Amino acid sequence: MKETLYRYLSGRSPQARERYEALRRSGEPRWKAAPVLLGAVFSGGKNSRRPLPQKGSESALSYREPSERLVEKLRRFDVVSFDIFDTLLLRAVDQPKDAFFFVGAKLGYPDFQRLRVEAESRVREKKRRIQGAGEVTLEEIWAELEKTAAVPPQQGMAVELEVERALCRGNPYFLPVVEGLRKLGKPMVLLSDMYLPGEFLEKLVEEAGFGKFQGLLVSGEKGDSKWEGGLFRRLREQFPEKVSFAHIGDNPHSDVKQAREQGATPFFYKNVNQAGGPFRAKDMSPVVGSVYRGLVNGKLHHGGEKYSVLYEYGFVYGGLFALGYCRFIHHMAQQCQADRLLFLSRDGEALLKLYRRLYPQDERPVYAYWSRLAAAKITAGLFPWDYFRRFLWHKAEKGLPLKQVMRSMELSPLLPELCAALGLSPTAPLTHKNAGAVQDYLTAGWSRILELYEPQRRAAGAYYRQLLSGSFRAMAVDIGWAGSGAVALWSAAEKLWGLDCKITGLLAGTNSAHSPERNAAEPLLLTGKLRSYLFSQGENRDLWNSHDPRQGHNLFWELLLGGEEGSLKGFYPSAEKGWRMEFSPNPHAGAVREIHRGLLDFGEEFLNLERRLGIELPISGRDAYGPMLEVLAAENAPYRRGLEALLDEPGIG
């Protein structure tokens, strides 16, 4: 009956089942862990979220006392013992069993994670029935696994140890703690409920920067565990009777309750994945999602450092996206045989830095100055509706006086006659009622307006003739959404400047179902003139349906990439080079720098892990969007409000 009920409840939500099992592993009794499964029934199996922090950063929630203070507390004990996994060592996955995905990948064996978990469970149960304790070794697990997987145990164990070594890294919080205790001459011992060989664990800890310890007790080799208290008893037997012990670990039962019952003073260290798990995106593929969560939780919740909200915004919500987008760009460039990659300002600034780290030998990428504002003026004769939409209709009802609107269009000389013709004051606000009349007046004198923009068209043409010199097939990289930046650029190159260079546009995402011009990019996606990474009507339609620019979704994505430099106002003639540029000031340059720092740091950590694993992890557009689903969730409106002051004004920019 119990098993039937469990299968029913856990089947309603795999995520709830995983949280329930994690709680049971951490020592929670069934009655305390059961509400997680019951909640899955009442929520319909949907993911539950904890609202993101509204005041301060996420890392501040797990910030611990300085390491030197902990050393002072520990120095009064004669011996200090440490748990290994999730204490001294952090894995780059959010669940230990996810390491087996990589073992299966290296062995080329399907469904390996499940087979490996079940084999361990079976051999533990057998030993529990026969010997009364379920502690096992890696050799015993693989002997059992060979029956169902037919993988030679020596080969399989070698791969598993290789994967564990690649995934583990030293916990930054404890590195100075261990160093401080070693300087005091304090005896330190390792205790672990683990099936891995003790010799391997010693090397793993040493390679992580902790050096050698005085002793090591491993449950699989000793037949005793911390969970049942046996390892603590064995430790005490190795020292004189009156020696005092301190123990540090992350499991409330093994490392706290049992340590105390066996005479040691426990120092609880909260598991980083339990601390950060409620904030992490779950709607991702199993392997990339686990790595993403493991890296982020380890970074934000190890307890040794507090990061800024802006740094975390880049690291947590932008890093995976930027890395995946750069790989998409490279793949498209190879597929289309592009000879130049134009990373359009300002959204291309951080992407270009990351791309060059990824592909340092690629000489094709360049930073290309371009903006909606400059493009609207330069291509006004090609796209008059887009020109009026951006300059007039997007600004209507914002209370902007006509003189300010005309100044932004750089048509101030026309203001007196426009006001006289329409009977309006220069200070009259632009509204939806008078915007049509303004458009009609400007359309009537359209040739004069195009003549005023002619110097800017020539200056921009001189700039791009130099930038695209020798290029016949280029790609323009932008954030999105209608693809107007890339469209305007290739149209100007072909129709205004006569450049013999075909330009394809690469977008992070297209217009969505909630965009007024939802079908704007479809003709160009159809012909391949535009390519989209995150979503389009033909890819990841769930994202296409949920992404809502009316709720500011575009702007929160743009915040991840917006450059430190101000937005390009336009190109203007110059005797020296044929062009010069003018920029609007950027009051948030420091904030942008901090976001980019986090974004690039995530990319570096992800790449380092891939190098250790020897595997490149595919980052789909769906996975790249996954973390941002947390930011854009309804319950996280207060978190978004904390970032709103940094957002660009929609429309011209």
Image (cartoon, rainbow, N blue to C red):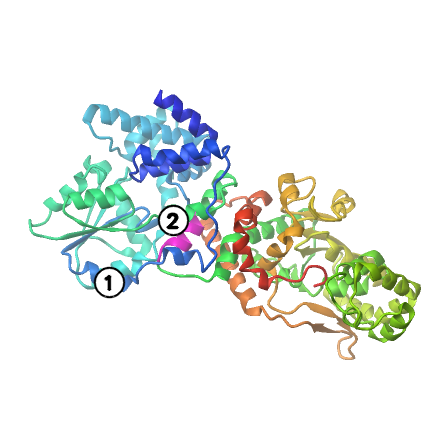
Snapshot quadrant of residue 393: bottom right
* Image coords of residue 314 (percent x, y): 52, 57
Where are the magenta residues, as a range?
Answer: 294-303
Instruction: List the residue tagged with mark 1.
Output: 180
Mark carried by residue 151 = none
Decide if residue 318 is in sight here.
Answer: no
Structural crowding at the residue carrying mark 2, measured as other residues with C-alpha within 10 Å and reported as few (<14), some (14–19) or many (≥20)? some
Q: Amino acid at mark 2?
A: Ala
Q: Disc 1 vs disc 2: which is toward the camera?
A: 2
Q: Residue furthest top?
A: 1
* Image coords of residue 366 (percent x, y): 66, 62
Residue 19's place in the image compared with 250, above or below, is above
Q: Amino acid at mark 1?
A: Gly
Which residue is at 89% across, 61% downward?
A: 440
Which residue is at 20% across, 58% downward?
A: 74
Instruction: List the residue tagged with mark 2.
Output: 275
Label 2 sits on a secondary structure element that is: helix
Label 1 sits on a secondary structure element that is: helix
Residue 371's place in the image compared with 603, above or below, is below
Classify residue 412 as left or right of residue 48. right
Instruction: Give the total number of marks visible in the rendering.
Output: 2
Q: CA distance from mark 1 to mark 2?
A: 26 Å
| Residue closer to the observer: 423 or 326 | 423
* Image coords of residue 396 (percent x, y): 77, 61
| Residue closer to the observer: 43 or 468 | 43
Decide if residue 84 is in sight here.
Answer: yes
Structural crowding at the residue carrying mark 1, measured as other residues with C-alpha within 10 Å and reported as few (<14), some (14–19) or many (≥20)? some
| Residue closer to the observer: 215 or 533 | 533
| First in sequence: mark 1 vs mark 2 | 1
Q: Are marks 1 and 2 in contact (CB under 8 Å)?
A: no
